[in-house]
Structures are given as structure tokens and as C-alpha cells.
Amino acid sequence: MKHSIIRRTLIVCGIGLMVLGIYRGEAAMIWQKAVYVCLECIGIG
Amino acid sequence: MQEKKEFREKNIKNKEKRTGLRLRGWIQALFFAFSNGYLAGYLNAKIYRGQLKQICVPGLNCYSCPGALASCPIGALQSLLDSKKFHFSCYIFGFFLVVGGILGRAVCGFLCPFGWIQDLCYRIPIWIPKRVPDTLRWKLERMNKRKHLPGHKVLIWLKYVILAVFVILLPMTVMTEFGAGVPWFCKLICPSGTLFGGIPLVLLDEALAANAGGYFLWKVTLLALLLSTSVFVYRPFCKYLCPLGAVYSGFYKISLFRLKLDESLCIHCGKCSKTCLMGVDPEHGKNRQECIACGDCQKSCPTKAISFWPKGKDTFSS
């Protein structure tokens, strides 16, 4: 029961943080980086 | 008659185990195809540029892979932390809370493409030719299919160090001479990026191939080492190096899909811990943070005391 409450609280907080992140423009920034080949990620940069 | 009965029972158990493996393997393959389904990327040596890349997949799946339709959470976290704009990523930490709270490390067992590749490597049989001399044969047989590397108990903490140093601290603090941040885990370690992104792009794009140098060679060597080790040792990258596994392992007590033991049914036969390739001891609740919900212990349990479903009875004292 205790674990269930903690889990639900964390999931709700997680959804809230995701919404806040989208509002702050984090998702857009991820998109800006992810649409170009990340040379470091593939071991070239 | 008794022998025949035992043989039949053993065959049924093996068949059940194979079916379970097949089901998990199919889920892994389907999720791999789903998250890397941009086929035009492989044909044109270009990566997907659509809006879906604002979303992260739960597993380690490089967003520079030609087939990737979404972003890698570890790559995304580093790209946000190494930018000067954000010092804390609400979006990615929120994503970890949601995915970890629901699935925990079941992500590693079912949804991670690199985990699937390691599973496939471990299924490669090791064949020792008859001509091999006995002294060498003995050594080869000792190497044959083991659960862990020597020093396992210490090495499992390495992934937390990698998470703290290469994914969080270095991208936040160490910049290039031009003031740009560097995704250090991707640059120096991530074998998923090399396998799904680096190698296909270098093979498909001549300009990238011309620029492949020391870092690429290092990453290919590391990838080769990890994949060859995976033939003998079960999931060495997940156990010792993966920062995403380190994040999800923090949810082992609370996630919806997690290892649950009904102690009233347990007969303490120890079959579950012997079966577990990740080194979890469900009976005594040891190393539960390493559980990837593969279900091998559940299948081996003669009294069905173990479950992973949300409604399973959980009487772990810890």
C-alpha cells in the first residue's frame, strides 16, 4: 500500500515535470539536437 | 517407466522455457523495429527529422541511428545538461519518474535494443572442436557461458559512477574551447550509438567515413569487446556499464512491474536464484535492483511463488 502511494505520487510528479519541461522548451531543444547527426554520439566528433 | 516420465516432464519444462524466451524475444524485436522503423534513413544515409524526435524511447536507442524515430533519454539528458540554457532537465527527470515508476528495469528486459542484441549474443552456442588438446579444452569449457565477470559484486556499482560522472557531471562542467558542451557518455562509451548509428552511417556516408578517426576506432573496439564478452557472459553492458539501467534500478521497490515474492508459497528450494542470469536472489531479496523482469525465476519456481504482474502478492520484508 505504502509502495503504491509512493509510486503514484512519483508518476504524477513525473508527468508534472514533463509538462513543465515541455513548457520550458526542453522537448524542442532535444528535437533541435536530434534532427542532426550527433558526431560525438557516433564516435566521429 | 519412471525415467520416461521424468524425460517427458523435463521436455515439457524446456518447451515452456523456450516459449517464454520466444515471447520476450518477439517483444524485443518488435520494439526494436518500432523504434528504428525509419527505413528511408538506411536507404538515403539520412536521419529522421520529424517531430517524433521530441519524444524519448524508454531504452538506449541512439537518435543518430538512421532508423531512429525518437530520441534516446541518456543522449537527450546530456544534450540538455551540456547546453547553457538548462542546468536541470525537468522533461527527462519527469520521463524517468514515469517510465521507472511503471516499468522499472523491465525496460532493460523487454524494450532496450542493445539489451536484445546482448541476449542474442548470449544465445550463440560455443563450439569446441574435437581436435583441441585437453589442457586447452578445459580452459575453454571453464569460459563457456557464465553468469558474471569476476569481481561482479564490485563491478555492478560501476554503472552508477558512469551515470554520475559521464552523463551528469562532465556534460555540465567540461566544455570545448568554443564553449560547447560535450555528451561524454555518448562520445567515449555508448556502444548502442556505435552499433546503431556510427557503423551504419560510416558505411553509408563517404564524408563521415573520411572523418572517422581515433574516437571511432576506440568505440568500435569497445563495442567488439562488449559483444564478444556477451557471447560468454550474460548482458555485461547492462550489468556493469549502462547508466539507464542505473536510473531504472532505483525503482526496484516501487515500480508497477517488479519482482514479487509470496513468501507463504515459497519452499526455499533456491531454483530461482540458480536460474537468474542477472544474479538476483528472489528468495532472500538480494540484488533485486538488478532484476530485468525476464521471468526466468518465475518459470523455474515449482510453487508459482514469484510474479511480476501488478496484482501479484508481494511479501518481501525489505
Image (cartoon, rainbow, N blue to C red):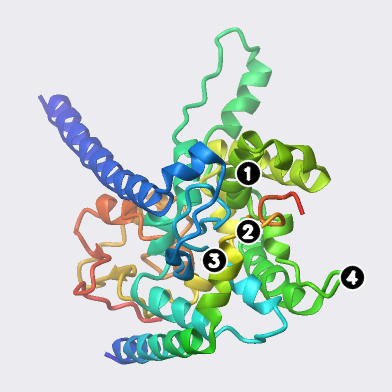
Q: Is residue B262 visible?
A: yes
| Tag in front: 1 or 4 | 4
Of B3 and B8, nearer the camera is B8
Q: Is residue A39 above or below residue B45?
A: below
Mark 2–mark 4 Cα distance, whole angstroms, equals 29 Å
Query: Exactly how many numbered labels are in the figure?
Result: 4
Which residue occupies 56% across, 37% down? B232
Mark 3–mark 4 Cα distance, whole angstroms, equals 29 Å
Of B164 and A1, nearer the camera is B164
Identify the residue position indicated by label 2 in the image: B241
Image quarter where the N terminus of chain B lies is: top left
Of B84 and B286, nearer the camera is B84
Q: Position of residue B264 (x, y in %)?
A: 21, 72
Q: Which of the 4 image quarters holds residue B316?
A: bottom left
Looking at marks 1 and 2 on the same chain, the residue that comes earlier in the sequence is marked by 1
Looking at marks 2 and 4 on the same chain, the residue that comes earlier in the sequence is marked by 4
Q: Contact, CB < 8 Å: mark 1 with mark 2?
A: yes
Q: Quick one: SS at disc 4?
A: loop
Q: Position of residue B215 (x, y in %)?
A: 79, 48
Q: Amino acid at mark 3?
A: Leu
Name the subunit of mark 1: B
Disc 2 residue crowd, few under 14, some 14–19, many 20+, Cα 10 Å = many
Name the subunit of mark 2: B
| Tag in front: 3 or 4 | 4
Q: Amino acid at mark 4?
A: Glu
| Direction top: furthest residue | B131
Mark 1–mark 2 Cα distance, whole angstroms, equals 10 Å
| Direction left: furthest residue | B1
Which residue occupies 12% across, 30% down? B5
Identify the residue position indicated by label 1 in the image: B226
Identify the residue position indicated by label 4 in the image: B177
Q: Amino acid at mark 1?
A: Leu
